[in-house]
Amino acid sequence: MGSVTAAGEAVARIAYLASDVVLSVQPALSIDSEFSAHLHALTAQKLPGIVAKTGAEVQPLRTNVDPLLSAFQPLQSGKLVSVTTSSSILLSSVPHLYKLAQYPIVLHVSLHPTDYPDYSEITSIRQSAFTFLQSETLQEAQDIALSAHALAIKSGKGVIHFFDISNSANDNAIRIEDRELVRNALDVDAARSLPLLGFGASSLYVDGGRRADITESNLPIVHTHRGQNHVPKATTEKSTPKTGSRDASSVGSSVRDSSADSRPSMSSMTSVDSTTTRLVSSEDIINFLTGIWSQIQSATGRIYLPFEYSGPANAESALFIFGSTGLFVDEIQAPGSSAEFASVGIITARLYRPWLGTKLIESIPPTIRRIAVLEQIRRKTTKWGPVLLDLLSTLRTGSSAAGVPLIVGHQLGYLEPATARQALRGIFQNLNSPSPVQNLEVGIAGGRKQTAREFQLQQPNAENAYMKILDQVFGQRLHVANRQDDADAGVSATIAANPEFGFGSLLARMDHRKRFIGEVQKAAKGQDFVTDVPQRWLSNWALNAEDTTKANSMAQEVIARLATDGSRLASQLLSSKGLFFKESQWLIGSDAWAYDLGSSGVHHVIASGANVNMLIIDSQPYSERAAADAARRKKDIGLYAMNFGNAYVASVAVYSSYIQVLEAMIEADAFDGPSVVVAYLPYNKEDDSALTVLQETKKAVDLGYWPLYRWNPGNDEKEEPSFQLDSERIKQELEEFLRRDNHLSQLMRRSPEFSANLSGSYGSEVRALQKRKAKDAYNAMLEGLYGAPMTVLFASDNGNAESLARRLGNRGRARGLKTLVMAMDDYPVEDLAGEENVVLITSTAGQGEFPQNGLAFWNAIKDTADLDLSPIRFAVFALGDSHYWPRKEDKIYYNKPGKDLDSRVAFLGGKRLTDVGFGDDQDPDGYQTGYGEWEPKLWQALGVDKVEGLPEEQPPITNEDIKLQSNYLRGTIAEGLADTTTGAIAAPDQQLTKFHGTYMQDDRDLRDERKAQGLEPAYSFMIRCRLPGGVATPSQWMQMDAISSSCGNETMKLTTRQTFQFHGVVKGKLRPAMRAINKALMTTIAACGDVNRNVMCSSMPEKSAYHRDVHQVSAKISEHLLPSTTAYHEIWLKDEDDKKTQIAGDAIVDHEPLYGPTYLPRKFKITIAIPPHNDTDVYAHDVGLIAIRGANGRLEGFNVLAGGGMGVTHNNKKTYPRTGSMLGYASADKIHYVCEKIMVVQRDHGDRKNRKHARLKYTMDDMGVDVFRGKVEDLLGYKFEEPRHFEFKSNIDTFGWQKDETGQNHFTFFIENGRIEDTAEFPMRTGLREIAKVHKGEFRLTGNQHLILSNVRDDELENIKDMMKQYKLDNVQFSGLRLSSSACVAFPTCGLAMAESERYLPELITKLEGCLEETGLKQDSIVMRMTGCPNGCARPWLAEVAFVGKAYGAYNMYLGGGYHGQRLNKLYRSSIQEDEILDIMKPLLKRYAQERKEGERFGDFTIRIGMIKPTTEGKTFHDDVAEEESATLLSSPALQTPYPSTEPKTAAARARVVERMDPEDRDADDTVRELIAGALAEVRAKHAGAWCLRRSLSTVQPARRSGKRKMGLGPGAGTTEPSIRVCAGISGPLEPLDLSSESTLAASALASRLIRNPHPTATQLRLPSSPHPYTIPPHSAFYLSIITPQSAAGFSAAASALHPTSSSTAGPGQFDFILLDPPWANRSVRRSRSYQTSEAEETDPLDALQGMLGRHIPRHGLVGCWVTNKAASKRQALEAFRAWDVGLVEQWVWVKTTVKGEPVTAVDGIWRKPYEMLLLGRRRGREEDGGEVGEARDRGGVVRRVILGVPDLHSRKPCLKELVAPMMEDRGMYRGLEIFARNLTTGYCAWGDEVLRFNWGGHWSRVDVADVGSASLHTPESG
Ligand code: SF4
């Protein structure tokens, strides 16, 4: 039984058990409350609740979002709700409290500030009709929390349980609550039988609520009524039965506080028959409580009363404390104080409201004469404290005057523990004095200073973004009226932050200025100045005082004139000089204001019409739940304000459009009237990363949940549209508003591209209908056909499965079948059972996952239990890559979706037409190989294999066909652009637009979301410019910048090939963008596609004249190789009036002299590098030109490289990166021809059949470099010259300022990953734009995605530097690693991305920078690159270290590239995740720092130390890769020679021993000896080398095993195994716990429950105590417990949660294979105590299992049991087999050998034998009953095998997973259970108290620790 140490925990546990919903109020989502961490832990454990079966739903809420509002919705739907909170929310929740008091809600309130709580938070709400209970000690907190819940359920009314947590801070731990007691006290059944309290979608602003009534039989009945539709009838006093059981005279009728009345408080209203029911009274409350408390008493012995007195029965004085009691109790009860305070008692109120006077009187001993009332009230608003009044009213009037004790009130301030005694003395002195002073203050009034600032809220980090913009835009003019941290406000932070407060202060400020203007006007007219200058200025200013621009521009001047005047009037005016400026006045608020617009002050501001600006930050992320919860849904402040009509309204989101925020703020400021800017900033926790906020924002904006718009009512007058939509989609409410106000049609006229989006607006549920319609249409079409139906359903990621499905459909149709082909997700699953023949074709996504368009289908059939597919016949074909995941344990992912589908459909009753077919990318023809075998079997099964006269099939359309048929790249692009019904263009056009420089993409972050909404993907286009050499003029820069705003997503990307790229251009904006680019004298033609693309050139800032020479050549080559088609002009640039349709007229047919109609086989890239810089990676391109400088310092010619290229396909060894081969030297004037001829050879010889083999690099390797060179030379008509000498030094940029040889200046900016954008912190884009406006030189884009500001003259330098500083652009102080890094775009836009790149690399580098700092490598340049896929856009294969995306979050790691791009790197690790990357990189960097040689580069170093082999050329890229397995199991040293003999020395001694042996042992030995001898001979004949593989040695010391409760063994050097505590008992049926990809759990949370890794990948489980995580293999599960009959029952119940996924024989909770490794009670086990099993180790370890295991073995299930070489253990095992109806079928002997293959001891030894046995049995089917069991059968047909192997760590047996697979019906997919397991196995469940042992990270190594000998586990079969 666990224990509880804090009141917060005790209360949280009770709240969790006793509620359906717990609202956990926290100061901030990232700051825990006293309760929240415990609540989360309970949720994580999935602890079952008592009220809610699966445990309460815990909803975290921030204190400042009006948290109690969230209680109504669940309460109204009949749920039991509790709230855990600090007292700080109570006062602001008063309006809710009155309503909530009528519901059975419980508020657990921890009083704050914690070291001196303010009890006035409780007294202030004492009349809210809640019942108030107080607890003091830890135990009381538990009991009273329970009482509160029980009372709320019984009474149907709200209960507040409050306590001061510091009172119990030092209490001893208590036991966790007794579940039985909680269950009994709560009486949940009664609560559930109450009528459901649903109101439907009730509004909170209507008088909802309910009243608790009671029947005379004392059963509470809760009636609900709504004020509106149910008018309660009045009843007379007579009809309300009186309880009248107490003396009414004890209650003062004049008491103001009516709820303090001890009479039963009764309403005169009731809604039901008054003769049977009445409202719940105070009397009832006490009756209920008494009942609850007596239940607690009888269960625990603890007594609770409404008022509690402690002290001597004859005491004369007492303290009545309403405050923190702890100090006084300690003091009075301290041993030393007994004499001093001997006759003193303490009274406290357990039940504070209702206040029951009689109970108080009963509790006070009659001897008491004086009572000191101590009230810990900070905010006192009346002379007498409320508790003093309560006491006075009860005691003064309640007893006869003579007996009334003297009552003296005291104010209890903050007390240090050391002063408690002194304070007590003071109190008693006063109390006992003849005339005691009332209201005496004790301790420090108001508490310690610092307590007031407890939980001071900070502006959440993210929200600072908006504050910064305000500061930036308005500078000194900015005045925020309600800053949370405003020290001058003189009021509390909460009040200062309130809009009403801010508004008031603003009005006062405006008024003040108005008066000031009046004064100025007067002064301007008067004669009181010394000179007449001020008058003129003042009158001029006064005229313009309300005009922001004018007033502010004059203000400085006016002030200056006044300052020189010197008159009194002048200095008087100057004393308010700030008012000469017109401020930009702002109120800043949170979305909490939106919940109640009326009372929050927002309404007042808008209604006032005053010129005030409000910025309201909404931080709620979009979620469907939030959108659906109508009660919680906030008012849309924007809509509210627009409906008002007089306000400027803008809806903005800084992470979506920074510019729009700026515009909105400026417009709001300029608007004369109220302005509301609602700003979106979604976060789940205040410290969320910017990336999360960005993603959330994007989602919300793109879905229309958060539309961006601006509404300026003032525009009407200017005849401009008042509504401006700045995002793509709007939500329904806004749409309605616009429609009503006739703005929608206006908007649609202006922006027709929105119409499609608007009509398919957010929230429409069209998906289901679409599905049905599509299928019905197909059916109608099929009606006319004959033949059997065949439904082909596909799930396809990259189109292969889809095209295969379509082809199959066509072929089926040709064979006369009625075929229907659909994506799985488009097919209504419920129709499946009605089909006849179903063919399922699926590819494999990610790590064995379903492709996106089949996922929903799979989820549906996977989860359904009632789909009967017995009528259908089916076949499955799966596509995958058997080498995609190189690790052995990951092989199960190969074609997993297909295998899963096959077994699931069969499980649901479907009959196989044929076996599942597998297509493997590794086969010679890829998946076609497997498909070719499978398809004929399908036709055969369908009986259509012999059909004759099949039509000839059209070959599939290839890219070559598309090019050929496109009419020189026209296709149907123009038509596609005109189609506004979709954001996409046709598939062939998607290929063609690439030639025009644009790709279609879709936002992958949004795919799922949009699919769920029934929307097409969020399509947009990427546009890439053509910019030879990357040189742009400032005006081009500005134009590019403008395009990214007007057409794109406000950002630009500088690419790795020196050009501009825009993302997020929607189709409608594609043409305008292209036109704008061409207007800037740039083009996009041939920026992508199978043509020569942008020509690159080194940027060379230090030699400008030379650079100019070379750059001109790049421009010339680019021009020379441009395609000639006029389609580009025609499609993108034609006139607005559509007249000039073709530049050269319709009659002219295009001609491509260089390319021909099919252009090139693949893309073609040319680059120029100028030594010593290889910043363009000259080796990585099809043509690489190395500039050679002549003696005159000018360009002379080029060394020509050809055949470089980067793109690769993972695991396809036929693809590889390649560095260019040297062809020779050519002079500069001929070089464009040389490029042309190389291109022409590639055009004519490149592979046009296989695009994966079409690049020049393959042509070159296929042809040989010399042949290729010869062909080029033939075309040129001359030979290349010998290459000239050159030397490269680096391939990175030199940052900062440099001067060139002509004296011009150049600055290289660090642009992280080439992304030009503004953020709140770094206005980079704005800065560059501003600089472009004044810059007279040029911009150079570098091949590393950075930017050079070139040719700045000395006289311009100062200004440029100032601007750079202003925009923070001058910072190049980054780590060498960061400066040398580069990443491609990848997610979300790149369609090929498998993992993040641009968004992730900066984060990864940040995580490494600490290590760089430590090792002194901060300044060192290490080239690190990352790409999201192996297409390799950032040229990763040339980096010293590279990461290439493999799957989401997983990367292949490459090492050993050359520092200046001259050598390819090589694969080091596959599919590793961040923690592994860091685990490798950090020690490696450390090693590099320590061991590198002078000047040695990182890539070279990794080769020298042998981590990686160098890649000498592309073709060897895949050779010699480092180990593919990413982790090695550590072993013990392999035994080299047999153990020394311990056998009896003489024959006589031996005979004596044999004599005493078990005869069975003797017999068995002979048989086994023969068997072993045969097996050894057989292996020796075939195998000569060592008998085991190389081993990595373990230094792990097993954990100390203290007593019976821990696992492991003794201490020692090296790593020590952690121990996990395992309790013998079970703690109740715990729900199975599913691990997430990384979980941290307390060891105690692991025991006695089923814990699963449901994922297809291994997950990491961490214990707080262990440095290494436990790796939990995919699809494995474990149950950690000692094996006893009790735990067996627990396991049995838990195992039923395991449903078969694939096996066809096992039912729920059953296993195809069960393996036992019992700790047989022999001497060795007893001696080592290595495995703890049952409490009584001497007995049969299988005892606990005999009765239960049978039900887990299916018919024909296989059971294995390890036994020792003693017959006794075998007998016990066979007995157990018999009990499970299992017959022995095989017996394996595991012989342990040395490295050389000798048995470790003599085979015929009698003391010690070198083997153990495995018995394998099968459960018999019913029809086989009666067959022989056990030994009889054993002697008959039992198969015997031998396993030979070198033993490993003690107790580690060979893994049997693969060895038994051949015995399973489905060898790959069977389900196993291992009992007494010591490790987990993929796909298995394990049970025992050491199940995690060898999964602990300490037993595994990522790198070799040591080599020991050699070893290999041979498992030959024998016999
Ligand atoms: S490397 Fe791959 S993921 Fe990255 S941008 Fe290129 S194609 Fe996309």
Image (tube, rainbow, N blue to C red):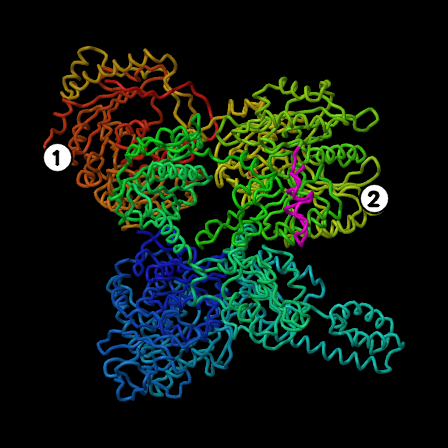
Against 1362, is 89 above or below?
A: below
What is the secondary structure assignment of the residue under circle 1? helix
Is label 1 within 8 A of ligand 1 (CB to nearest ligand atom)? no
According to the picture, the residue beneath numbered tag 2 turns out to be: 1353
What is the secondary structure assignment of the residue under circle 2? loop
Q: Is residue 1452 left or right of residue 711?
A: left
- Give the residue type that dot 2 points to: Arg
- Give the residue type that dot 1 points to: Glu
Q: Residues within 10 Å of mark 2 (few under 14, many from 20)?
A: some
Which stretch is magenta?
Answer: 1124-1152
In front of the other: 1142 or 1016: 1142
In the rendered image, residue 203 lying in the magenta stretch gets the answer: no
Q: Which of the numbered marks, if any, corresponds to residue 326?
A: none
Ligand 1 falls in quadrant: top right
Residue 484 seen in the current view: no
Going from N to C along the chain, the mark reached first, 2 or 1, is 2
Magenta: main secondary structure: loop
Q: Is residue 1182 left or right of residue 729?
A: right
Residue 70, how many percent across, how many down? 43, 66
Residue 150, how many percent across, how many down? 30, 67
Q: Name the residue at the left extreme.
A: 1826
Q: Which of the numbered marks, if any, corresponds to residue 1823?
A: 1
Q: How many numbered discs?
A: 2
Q: Residues within 10 Å of mark 1 (few under 14, many from 20)?
A: few
Q: Is residue 1105 left or right of residue 1075?
A: right
In front of the other: 1374 or 450: 1374
In front of the other: 1678 or 1492: 1678
